[in-house]
Image (spheres, rainbow, N blue to C red):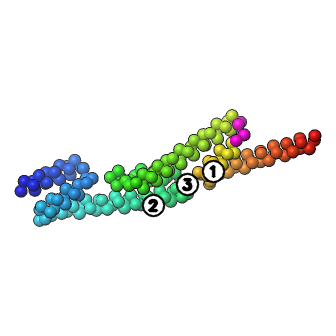
Amino acid sequence: QDEVNRQEELVNQRVKRKQFDGLITEVEKLVALRPDRKDVINLQTKLRNRDKKRLQQRDDAIQHAKKFLAVRDYESAIAVLRKVEPSVITDEVTRLRSQAENLQAQLRSLLQDIKQARSEKRFDGLMDTVKEAMTIAPEDDGLTNLLASLEAREDKIAAENIEQIAKF
């Protein structure tokens, strides 16, 4: 009887404090001690459903994040993974989020380098930075257009050099 009272008190305290993570274990102990308690069995069912829902939300988030990463939408991947409840985070969630955050940070850094180089009119070597950024964001029209203009600039410079050499 003391064990039943202790377990009931523990469960009641955690429910009042809304500390539901891991509560299912304590509720199952109480159900084993008092299988006749319909309210405890009802709580057990609710907690199991809650856990199932969280796991499903996590699994859905993983699938969505993978799709976002495949199309290089890093921000959306990060946003969907941020919504995963801490109690159900797995190594895969952590890995995917880290991957998306790293790629997003790398892209931001490259875009900042490109912006600064353009504002300072430093075009030599810029093509390599643009190509690197395009490996992270190949669908970016701005990068595609910039690469085309840099290639045209190099072609023009090469043609001018050939013309200069031909004059000698």
Question: Dot 3 lies on which element?
Answer: loop
Which residue is at a point 77% across and 45% down the rendered structure image?
Answer: 154
Which residue is at a point 52% across and 51% down the rendered structure image?
Answer: 74
Label whose residue precedes the other's in the sequence (1 or 2): 2
Q: Position of residue 120 (x, y in %)?
A: 69, 34
Q: Amino acid at mark 3?
A: Arg
Q: Residue furthest bottom?
A: 36
On the picture, is 109 further left or further right than 150?
A: left
Picture quarter with the C terminus: top right
Question: What secondary structure characterizes most of the magenta part?
Answer: loop
The residue carrying pointer 3 sits among few (fewer than 14), some (14 to 19) or many (20 or more) residues within 10 Å by Cα, namely some
Q: Which residue in the protein does label 2 denote? A: 63
Q: Which residues are magenta?
A: 121-125
Q: Nearer the viewer, residue 111 or 162?
A: 162
Q: Is residue 123 magenta?
A: yes
> Can residue 40 be seen in this snapshot?
no
On the picture, is 53 further left or further right than 16?
A: right
Q: Amino acid at mark 1?
A: Met
Q: Position of residue 89 (x, y in %)?
A: 37, 53
Q: Which residue in the protein does label 1 denote? A: 134
